[in-house]
Image (cartoon, rainbow, N blue to C red):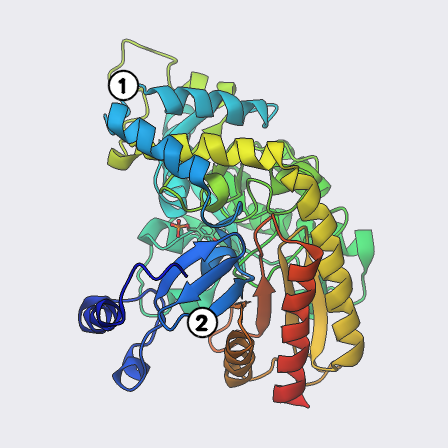
C-alpha cells in the first residue's frame, strides 16, 4: 500500500463507513463491535485493507468482476481522456467509444449484431425481458409473453429480474413478483436425484434434464412461452456446469417451439470460462439475446450490454411510420463514455496478454488442485467449474449429500481471509443452504497465485473439519 491515507484519515473513513454506508448483502450487527473491512488499494491480483493487510483476491472484487486485475493504468488513462473530451450524452445519440466498442464486441460474437448499452447486469436483463414482451405483442397479440427461467439461476436484483430468480433465499420477503415468469428445473448432475433422474448419467442425463424444460413448455402451452433465459454456467446458484448433451437439446427445444433464447453472460462473459469470450460459445449455442456486465470493463466503470441479432433488431423497425413500434426504452447512464472507453482497453488487454488462454491453463491447474483436495477432504462432495470459475460443494456426508452448515462456510471463508486469501461462497437456492465455496481469480493469475489460493483452502478445511 502506498500510504496515501494517514492513520487518522483511515479511522475517519472507517467511522464514516460505520455511521453512513449500508453495505450490500451484509448483516450490520457485527459492525457494532468489529470494524467493516475497507479495501484501500488493489494491484494485479492483490488488494490491501485499512490495516495494511494484503490479500490475494480469489474472487475478483468479491463478485467475479475484475477480470484483468487491479491498477491498470491504460484503462484509467482511456477513461480520463474520454471524460475530458466528452463525458456523457444520452444514447439517443451515439458516442465514439460506444461505437468502437460495439464493433469490437460484435466481432467476437458471430451471429449477433446490435449492442444496447446500459449500466448493470440486472438492467441488461430487464432490457431483454422488455424486448421479449414487446415481440410477444408485435407478433402474437401479447399471448407468447411468458419467460422461462431456471431453478438456481440468478438474473439480478430488480423486481422483474428477481421474478426470474431461481434462488429462493434471495427472493424471500420481496414478493409479490411480476407475473409471466415460469420456473424450469435445474440441470445439476450432482443433485440429479432432486430431478427424479438419479438413474441416468452423462449425455442421457443431460438430454433428460433439458427435456424437463420441454415438459414445462407443454404444460404452460407453447403458444404462451416467448423466451427461455439461462446462465451458460450457473454462477451464484452454486457454480453449476451443464451436463453433456444439455445445450444441444435446449437449442432444439427452443427451435421447435419458436422460443427465443436469452443467455445471461453477466458472470461468464468476457473470458471468465477460458478459451472463448463467452460461456455459450463452448456449447455451440445460437442465442437471440446475450446480456453481460461484470467483466465488460472489469469494474473500472459501470457498463453492461444487451446484445441481440439483426433479426430481432429488424422487428423493431418493421414499420417506421408507427411511432410505437420501436424499443421505447432509455438507460440514462447507458450514455456514459467511461464504460465503453474502459471496455475497449479491457478487451485489448485480454487479447494482447493472451488472457483467454491463461484462463484455460490456470483454470485447469486450479481444477486439478481442487480435485486433489477432494481426495484429501471428505467434506468436498463435488468440484465443478469452467476456466477460472470454480466451486466446491461441501457436504456432511458424501452419500446423503446433506449440505454443511452455513456457519462452517463462514468459518472457511474467514480462515482463508485470515491467511490473506479472499474466497467467496455461492448457492442461495434453498434458504440457509449456502454450501459452495467459490473461486474466480483474475484471468492474469499465475501458477503461484493458484497454488497459494488452494493451499489456503486446504489449511482452512483442515482447521474447520479436521
Ligand atoms: N446475472 C447474473 C448471472 C449475475 O450473477 C448477476 C450479479 N451477481 C446479475 C445478473 C446482476 O448483475 P448486477 O448486480 O450488475 O445488476
Q: CA distance from mark 1 to mark 2?
A: 46 Å
Tag 1, which secondary structure? Answer: loop
Cβ of mark 2 under 8 A from ligand 1: no
Q: Which mark is residue 93?
A: 1
User: Split into 4 quadrants, where in the image is the N terminus?
Assistant: bottom left
Is residue 109 visible from the viewing direction of this image? yes
Find residue 22 and report its horizontal and vertical position in percent: 25, 67
**Residue at point 32%, 53% (across, down):** 159
User: Split into 4 quadrants, where in the image is the C terminus?
Assistant: bottom right
Find residue 309 and report its horizontal and vertical position in percent: 51, 23
How many discs mark residues in the rendered view?
A: 2
**Quick check: 376 left or right of 183?**
right
- Name, please, the residue furthest toward the top: 321
Tag 2, which secondary structure? Answer: loop
Q: Which residue is mark 2?
A: 53
Find residue 167 and report its horizontal and vertical position in percent: 48, 63
- Does label 1 or label 2 sit earlier along the sequence? 2
Find residue 316 and report its horizontal and vertical position in percent: 38, 20
**Quick check: 283 left or right of 290?**
right
Amino acid at each position: 500500500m502506498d500510504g496515501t491515507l494517514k492513520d487518522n484519515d483511515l479511522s475517519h473513513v472507517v467511522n464514516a463507513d460505520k455511521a453512513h454506508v449500508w453495505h450490500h448483502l451484509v448483516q450490520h450487527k457485527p459492525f457494532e463491535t468489529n470494524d467493516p473491512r475497507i479495501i484501500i488499494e488493489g494491484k494485479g491480483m492483490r488488494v490491501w485493507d485499512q490495516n495494511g493487510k494484503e490479500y490475494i483476491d480469489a474472487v475478483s472484487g468479491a463478485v467475479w468482476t475484475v477480470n484483468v486485475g487491479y491498477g491498470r493504468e491504460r484503462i484509467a488513462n482511456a477513461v480520463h481522456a474520454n471524460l475530458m473530451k466528452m463525458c456523457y450524452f444520452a444514447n439517443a445519440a451515439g458516442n465514439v467509444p460506444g461505437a468502437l466498442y460495439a464493433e469490437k464486441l460484435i466481432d467476437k460474437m458471430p451471429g449477433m449484431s446490435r449492442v444496447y448499452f446500459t449500466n448493470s447486469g440486472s438492467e441488461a436483463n430487464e432490457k431483454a425481458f422488455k424486448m421479449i414482451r414487446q415481440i410477444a405483442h408485435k407478433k402474437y397479440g401479447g399471448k407468447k409473453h411468458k419467460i422461462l427461467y431456471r431453478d438456481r439461476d440468478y438474473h439480478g436484483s430488480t423486481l422483474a429480474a428477481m421474478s426470474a430468480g431461481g434462488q429462493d433465499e434471495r427472493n424471500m420477503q420481496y414478493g409479490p413478483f411480476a407475473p409471466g415468469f415460469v420456473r424450469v428445473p435445474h440441470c445439476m448432475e450432482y443433485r440429479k436425484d432432486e430431478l427424479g433422474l438419479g438413474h441416468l448419467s452423462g449425455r442421457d442425463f443431460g438430454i433428460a434434464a433439458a427435456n424437463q424444460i420441454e415438459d414445462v413448455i407443454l404444460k404452460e402451452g407453447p403458444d404462451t412461452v416467448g423466451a427461455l433465459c439461462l446462465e451458460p454456467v450457473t454462477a451464484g446458484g452454486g457454480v453449476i456446469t451443464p451436463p453433456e448433451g444439455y445445450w444441444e437439446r435446449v437449442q432444439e427445444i427452443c427451435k421447435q417451439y419458436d422460443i427465443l433464447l436469452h443467455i445471461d453472460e453477466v458472470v461468464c462473459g468476457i473470458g471468465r470460462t477460458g478459451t472463448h469470450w463467452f460461456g455459450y460459445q463452448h456449447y455451440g449455442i445460437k442465442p437471440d439475446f446475450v446480456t453481460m456486465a461484470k467483466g465488460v470493463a472489469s469494474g473500472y466503470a459501470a457498463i453492461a450490454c444487451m446484445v441481440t441479432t439483426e433479426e430481432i433488431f429488424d422487428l423493431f423497425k418493421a414499420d417506421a411510420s408507427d411511432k410505437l413500434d420501436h424499443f421505447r426504452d432509455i438507460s440514462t447512464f447507458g450514455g456514459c463514455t467511461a464504460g465503453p472507453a474502459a471496455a475497449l482497453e479491457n478487451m485489448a488487454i485480454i487479447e494482447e496478454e493472451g488472457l483467454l488462454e491463461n484462463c484455460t491453463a490456470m483454470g485447469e491447474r486450479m481444477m486439478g488442485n481442487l480435485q486433489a483436495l477432494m481426495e484429501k477432504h471428505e467434506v468436498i462432495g463435488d468440484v465443478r467449474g469452467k476456466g477460472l470459475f470454480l466451486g466446491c460443494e461441501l457436504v456432511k456426508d458424501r452419500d446423503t449429500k446433506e449440505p454443511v452448515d452455513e456457519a462452517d462456510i463462514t468459518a472457511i471463508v474467514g480462515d482463508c481471509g485470515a491467511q490473506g486469501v479472499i474466497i467467496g461462497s455461492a448457492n442461495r437456492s434453498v434458504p440457509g443452504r449456502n454450501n459452495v465455496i467459490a473461486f474466480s481469480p483474475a484471468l492474469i493469475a499465475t501458477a503461484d497465485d493458484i497454488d497459494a489460493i488452494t493451499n489456503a483452502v486446504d489449511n482452512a478445511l483442515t482447521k474447520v473439519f479436521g
